[in-house]
Image: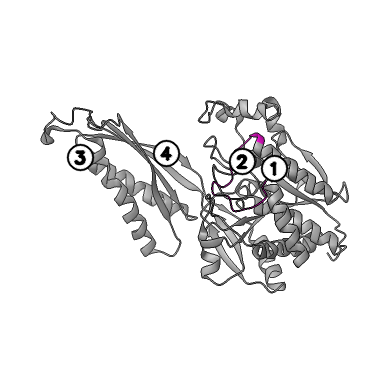
Amino acid sequence: MPDLQNWLETNLLKLNLAEEMDYEQGFSRLSYTKEEKQSHHVFQSIAQDLGLEVKADQAGNQWATWHVDDQAPTVAVGSHVDTVKNGGGYDGVAGVLTGLAAIKALKDQNIKPVKNISIICFASEESARFGVSTIGSKAISGLLDKEDIASVKDTDGITIKEAIEDFGLSWETIDQAEVPESKLESFLELHIEQGTQIETNDADIGIVRGVACPIRLQVTATGMANHTGTTPMTRRSDAFTAIAPLITFVEEQANLLNSEQDIPLVATVSTVSLEPNVMNVIPGEVTLGIDIRSVADSLKKELADRIQAYCHKIEEKRSVDIHIHTLVDNPSVFLDPKVVEKLTKVTEKINYKPFHMDSGAGHDVMNMANKWSTGLLFIPCEQGISHHPKEFASINDLAKGTQVIAEYLKEETGEDL
């Protein structure tokens, strides 16, 4: 165990391109940048040191494979190394690191697998740069609509197409990264929890049943901009005042729905755009962004319907027009119950306590589940902090996650089948 922990600590720093983890500004390895590429190069180096065959696909995903038989199926494990701006060094990296560490553990035990094992380092999981997430895993699983995202720009005006070509890839062939269903048998991802349920329930490992994909609404209230000093209070069409009660309505209704049933729902008014946003002008147009999540799709729809009905009431009372545009309405993803059962058994076998839970955040695994049998493990992260420089997962918890993956791979691919 000390040897494993030392290996994890050393390579955690390497993958983060760092000499220490405690950086005040955190880590910034945005999608398809030189920083992400540098971390990919480190992944390649670590994998080669473990004796794995390494290749990159047309979308920039890195594949490190313990290849034993051309005719044998492949079991895959993986995550990503890109980050949000000024983010933590564990989100994504934990899954890549523990996947590689599990291979090391199996080789140290002289395990001889009869199936191939691939560790995948996905490209561009985070949406921080372009507002588009999980590009690499979408490409692998055949869910990437490249024409739909080609012209999407970052804050510097660089399009996704340009960034990918600057990364050394060909835009014309990116969709050729898709992997046939027959090439993989299953996929497993490990991630930090980004919450506190594991610790709250005094458990060691979270085993995820479903991923709560969002409904995202863009609600725009249009009134009339006018002079703040000369327009009487009784003759205003203030879009901001009219739409403001919707913010508390969303919170209140989410709490009400949670009090009525056991499956949790969360809802957040997370963006506000106000025009013309000038001190002496009454707001003429306000747009709110609303993010609704639950593994129960019917609950998400129920809240979205209540929001629409409430907006109609606002229109009736106030001299504003309200338009609701649904940006995203993705059904929740449920992971393979058989994999959940296997992960539960191996976790208990090595004397760790599992906790069954759902994920409120999206991960690469939700795309891989489109084609393959999938599983998702969580390890604790301190105080649930993530996407922040203070994000932290202990080496001990990383080691526990590694041991679960290694035991799972041993049973899925080893000689004792």
Is 361 in front, or is 369? 361
The residue carrying mark 2 is: 29
Helix, strand or loop at mark 1? helix
Q: What residue type is labelled 1?
A: Ser
Tell me the tag on residue 326. Answer: 4
Colouring style: one colour
Q: Earlier in the sequence, mark 4 or mark 2?
A: 2
Q: Is residue 180 visible?
A: no
Label 4, label 1: how far apart the Cα atoms are: 36 Å
**87 shown above or below 192:** above
Q: Earlier in the sequence, mark 4 or mark 3?
A: 3
Q: In which quarter of the image is the N terminus?
A: bottom right
Residue at position x 25%, y 35% in the image = 239
Q: Is residue 14 magenta?
A: no
Camera-side mark, 4 or 1: 1
The reply to whether discs 4 and 2 touch (Cβ–Cβ < 8 Å) is no
Camera-side mark, 1 or 3: 1
- Res. 252 image quadrant: bottom left
Q: Earlier in the sequence, mark 3 or mark 2?
A: 2
Camera-side mark, 3 or 2: 2
- Res. 283 image quadrant: top left
Q: What residue type is labelled 3?
A: Glu
Helix, strand or loop at mark 2? loop
Q: Which amino acid does label 2 sit on?
A: Arg
Q: Which amino acid does label 4 sit on?
A: Thr
The reply to whether discs 2 and 1 touch (Cβ–Cβ < 8 Å) is yes
The residue carrying mark 3 is: 316
Is 145 in front, or is 37? 37
Label 2, label 1: how far apart the Cα atoms are: 8 Å
Magenta span covers which residues?
A: 18-34
Q: Which of marks 1 and 3 is nearer the N terminus?
A: 1
Label 4, label 3: how far apart the Cα atoms are: 22 Å
